[in-house]
Every structure is written in C-alpha cells, then in structure tokens.
Image (cartoon, coloured by chain):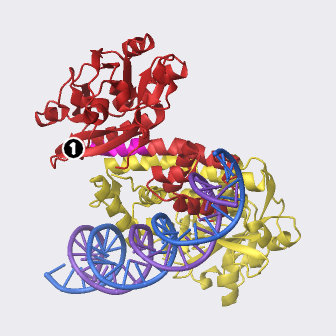
Chain colours: A red, B yellow, C blue, D purple
Amino acid sequence: MQSILELRHLKTLQAIAATGNLTRAAERLFLTQSALSHQLRQLEEHYGLPLLNRKSTPLKLTAAGEKLLGLANMVLPAVAASERDLARLREGEAGSLRIAVECHTCFDWLMPAMDRFRAHWPEVELDIVSGFHADPVQLLFEERADLAIVSEPEDDAALYCQPLFAYDMVALIANDHPLAAKAWLAAEDFRDETLITYPVPDEMLDLLRKVLKPAGINPKRRTTELTVAMLQLVASKRGIAALPRWSVQGYLDKGYVTARPVTQQGLRSELYAAVPATHASHAYMQDFLTLMREVSMENLPGVSLLNP
Amino acid sequence: MQSILELRHLKTLQAIAATGNLTRAAERLFLTQSALSHQLRQLEEHYGLPLLNRKSTPLKLTAAGEKLLGLANMVLPAVAASERDLARLREGEAGSLRIAVECHTCFDWLMPAMDRFRAHWPEVELDIVSGFHADPVQLLFEERADLAIVSEPEDDAALYCQPLFAYDMVALIANDHPLAAKAWLAAEDFRDETLITYPVPDEMLDLLRKVLKPAGINPKRRTTELTVAMLQLVASKRGIAALPRWSVQGYLDKGYVTARPVTQQGLRSELYAAVPATHASHAYMQDFLTLMREVSMENLPGVSLLNP
DNA sequence: TGTTAGCAATGAGCAATACTCATCAGTCAG
DNA sequence: CTGACTGATGAGTATTGCTCATTGCTAACA
C-alpha cells in the first residue's frame, strides 16, 4: 500500500545496470552483495514483479526493472543537481580549482572530467597549472595550485589525499620485435633496448623507479612529449616504451604495436588526488573528486577504482 | 559527504509546504510532529543550511527549502507515475470502476477526482451508476457497482471500507429570517419551518436521521433535485435547508443566504468509500481511494481527513 | 498580568530495518 | 571433478527512524 521505494533503491538499480553484477554494484555503493540482494528481494516482493533476470550474465533488468531504472536516471541527476545548488547557497558560487599534474597522459581523462565540472560550477575558476613541475605537491603549499594528481599517496596532515584508480603499465614493442614472442618482459629485457619516455625526471617514471632502478639496469634513452610520437618510434623499432594501458588501448586494438606486461605480475600504477586539507571540504572540490573517479571509470578501459 | 537525502525527506517537505505546520504535516504522513522535527534537523545539519523559517506562522520555507521542495515536486510525481506503471505491468491495463453514490452533493468533488483518475488509468472503465438507489451497497453485491460512497462505515467482512473525510452540515436560512439571529439552531427550531431536501429516503438525510427524528420533530417538506434551486427557495423564505458547508461555501461568501450550525456542537457528517474486498487490492482502486482524499482536501473548504 | 492553548525543539528509549556475516546452491571453465 | 565466481538465504547485529514525555516559546485572551 504505502510506497517503500527510497532513493537508495534507485541508486542500487543504477549500479546494477551499470555493472551487470551484484558484487561489483555493491562495491561501487560501499555495501555488500548481500545488502543489494535483500534490497532487490524487498522491492520485488512489494511490487509483485521480478526486477531482474537472474539467468543471464551479465545481469539483465526486466521490463519492470527498466521502468525503475528510467526513473532512477531521471531522478538521481536531479537530486545531485539540487544538492549542488544547496552547496552553492552555503558557500557561494565562486572559487578556484587549479590542477597540477605530474603525469602527461592524465590529460586524456582530466579533460572530460573538467568539462563536466564546468557545467556544474560555471563560476569556479578552472585551470591546469601550465608547465611541468618536478613536485606538483610543492605547488599546493605555494598556493599556486589547489589540486595535484600524483602517483603515490601523500602522507602529510596538511593534505587530504584521495585515491583515484589503479591501472596497468604495459611495455610497447613493435609487432615483429623479438620480445613480442615473450608473454611478459623482465627488467633484463630492457638492458639492450632504447627506452622512449616523456622528458620528465626519472623519479616520475614508474618503470624506472619500480623495476629498472632496483634491478640496476639503465638502458639508452630517448624522449618525446607526444604519445603518438612515442608509438611511431616504437612501431619503427627505434625503441620500446612503457605507458598506461588505457592511454594506448585504441592503438592496440588497431594492431599498431604490441603490448606486453612488465614483469610476471605486471606493473600496477596508481593515481591519487592531493588537496590542501583546508580546501577539501568545499563542495565543488568534493564534486570534482567524485567526478574524476566517475569519468575515469566510464572512459578508461581496464582501470579499477581504489577505495577511498 | 555521502548524500543522506531520501524520498521520505522530500515527502516531508512537501507536506510542510502544503500545511505550513509541522503537526498537521505529520498527521498527513501518519507520523508524529517529533519525527518531522528530527528529520528536518538532520537535513539542516547535513547541508549546513536552515530549510525553514521557524519565526513565521504559517511555517515558511527558506530559499534552500524551496530548492528542495522544487525537487520534491518534480521527483515525487515521477515516482508515483512509475509505481503506477509497475502496477499496470502486473495487473494489466484494464478494469472497471463504477461508482454508486447515495449523496447528491458528492458530484462536486467526485468529478475532479474522476478527471485525475482518467489521466492515470485511461484503460479503466470509469462510470457513475446512474439513477439514485436507496442502498448503494446493495449495488456492490449485485456487481452493478465497484465502489460506493456512503455516510456510515460498513461492517461487512466482504467489504473493504475506507474513511474519506468529515465535514459540517449547516442549516441554511434567509438572511433576514428570524432564526438568523440565533448562534445555532436546535431541533425545536425546525418544527414550524418547511424543510427543503433532495428527493431521497429519510434515512439518507443526516439532519432527519440524527437530529429531528430523535427529537420527534417532523416538519413540512419540500424537495428539489438541484442545490441552486434549494438556495433559491431558502433565500425567498420558502423554507430552510441543511447541506454540507463545503457544497455551499461559495454562496455563503457572496452573502446569498445565512448558515447556522445545527445543534450547539454542530452536525458532523462523514463519508466512507466501500468496495468489495476482492477489488480492494487492485492498484487502480487503491489509487482512486487516495485520489478522493487528496482531491477533497484540496478543493473542499473546512473538511478534515479521517484516519484510515 | 497571569493563564491557557498551540506549536516546535529536544533527549531518552525503543522498535523497525538495513546491513553484515557465514553459508549454501548453482553455473561455468579448466 | 574441482575451483572460481555468481546470487540467495537466514540469523544476528548495528543502525536509524520513530515515539513518548517534556520543555520553552509565542500569542491570544481574560
């Protein structure tokens, strides 16, 4: 009789539709698989209708489920927008969000996140701090930036550090390169090759810091600023490179070059967002932090969210 | 950080905006005043903003409150519509809803309720059973009607009976009639007057059943089918009538005739909807039952809902 | 000016319920 | 057949949303 539906249920349905899997949907909502299963059963009992087809993998919504999903898709964005409005009412419209990056490839996913953000907070001054800096965190302390994208968690009490996502770095080699025959590359394999990198300090290159330096290997080097140029050099056997899989997936799909894991376990890298603790509570900052996670999940193949 | 907003909160805000009063809003939601107060405080703490201005009576929403109310007004109807869709998915589109009335004046508020219903359930056959019947409940058993509007609760297990609302019956007299000088009319006052009624059996006239019959008073009678005709007769001192206040409020506001309570405590009447128990669970029936209550609250002055 | 009625706020306590945990059953790939 | 991965389920717990009882405030009225 009385409606038992709550926003919680709509969020659940959205997560299930997005992941096609109760377990992963639960993760996304910071709940357990059991919780979602119970929620679902309660809804289905209440409406006397199945909401999803359990037989299929990935999980498919029934017609009734789709109806409610449609509701969720119209209601939840409206709720989010209203909550932003309230935050603006409390904190005012304006503010600044200057982003410092240490990693070239980040632009790929930062751009769509920034676009979405601009629509939410037109009055916030949004910038990427130009030029590359050895230590982007330093820019935060100098108040020349409000947010830094870094590859290791910062352990400073003056900073709030939010995990973004993890991804695999892969070695890129020409399709007919002898190393392409191997299932994965060891540090040794780089010894006699030319390593192609961005023109940044060694400490900012995960391959060098985590794999080659520890093994005492220091290959010949060549640098370029552009990812496409790197791929061009690799394809023409002028050297090998190591890049995030998500930044080159498009080229891999076209068979332009070959990717191989670095070391047997793979080389897993992570990204974190660091913001001055004083800025962390701002609503627009919180919004951007979640936006970055959302956008990267949507757009980048093979990344996994890190628990905040 | 995490959103705590739920549909429950939106319903609360809507009720507060509608009643301008926590206590009455709580009644409408079948909760206590305390519950709403706590809800409100939780929201205000979470958003760091006051949602309503406590100083004013009736309670006024702040800008932030209005924002959320706007959200409620867009979200809640969408939710209700989706739930109707689900009900249709389960039970099918069609059905019949034939309404039997024992009280002439009911048309005033039945019409808008029926209009709203038709929009919700276009495939349900909606009718008022024509002609007047001494016992509309009988029509339910004969399966010639699906819902009856009656003035006393039915005590039959085969029927589901929902209270609708309560209202005051008032005596109508000419402005310069001697009885207009009295604050209220006693049974005695009717003895030498002509009573103007609808042409229905005496048991269906609350004034006769509850006041005059018990006092052993049986005044002269005159009948007419139309409410306006009754008022015309009253105004020209051809007799006095007793009608629901809500059905004549418009004429009273224009000073056309004078209204006086019947007996010192007033003559309070009630309306109930009776439906065959077998039909009561149908979603469209439930929808109509709540629609009748909603519409009468909105349109009829001085009525009060009865607790179901 | 005291008195009462009406209203919202508050804190304590309780009951409903939303969740987790542990486990089971089914499906699929190796 | 086994192990990995899935969702379902029941029991138990932690949370939370609610009610109850009371207080403080305001306004109306004698």
Which of the two residues, B202 or B280, is positioned nearer the viewer here? B280
Residue at 41% across / 26% down in the picture?
A: A171
Which residue sits at x=76%, y=77%?
A: B202
Q: Residue at 35% of width from left, 67% of height from top?
A: B38
Residue lying farthest to the left in this orientation: A142
Which residue occupies the foreground of this view, D2 or A113? D2
Task: Residue A49 in the image: state x and y as whole percent.
Answer: 70, 57
Q: Is residue A73 highlighted in magenta?
A: no
Q: Quadrant of the N terminus of chain A?
A: bottom right
Q: Amino acid at mark 1?
A: Glu
Chain ID of residue with mark 1: A
Picture coordinates of residue A125, whole percent (x, y): 24, 28
Q: Which span of residues is magenta-colored?
A: A80-89
Height in image: A109 above or below B235?
above
Determine whether, in the image, residue A129 is placed left or right of residue B219. Answer: left
Q: Up-down: is B58 above or below A136?
A: below
B11 displayed left or right of A200:
right
Q: Give the dominant element type of the magenta stretch: helix, strand or loop.
A: helix
Image quadrant of residue A118? Answer: top left
Q: Position of residue A183 (x, y in %)?
A: 50, 31
Q: Is residue B120 visible?
A: no
Helix, strand or loop at label 1? It is loop
Q: Depth check: give the residue in front, B196 or A243.
A: A243
- Quadrant in which residue B157 is drawn: bottom right
Question: Does residue A166 appear left or right of residue B121 in this picture?
Answer: left
Seen in the picture, residue B203 relative to A172 is either above or below; the reply is below
Magenta span has A82? yes
Mark 1 = which residue? A154
B285 vs B169, nearest the viewer: B285
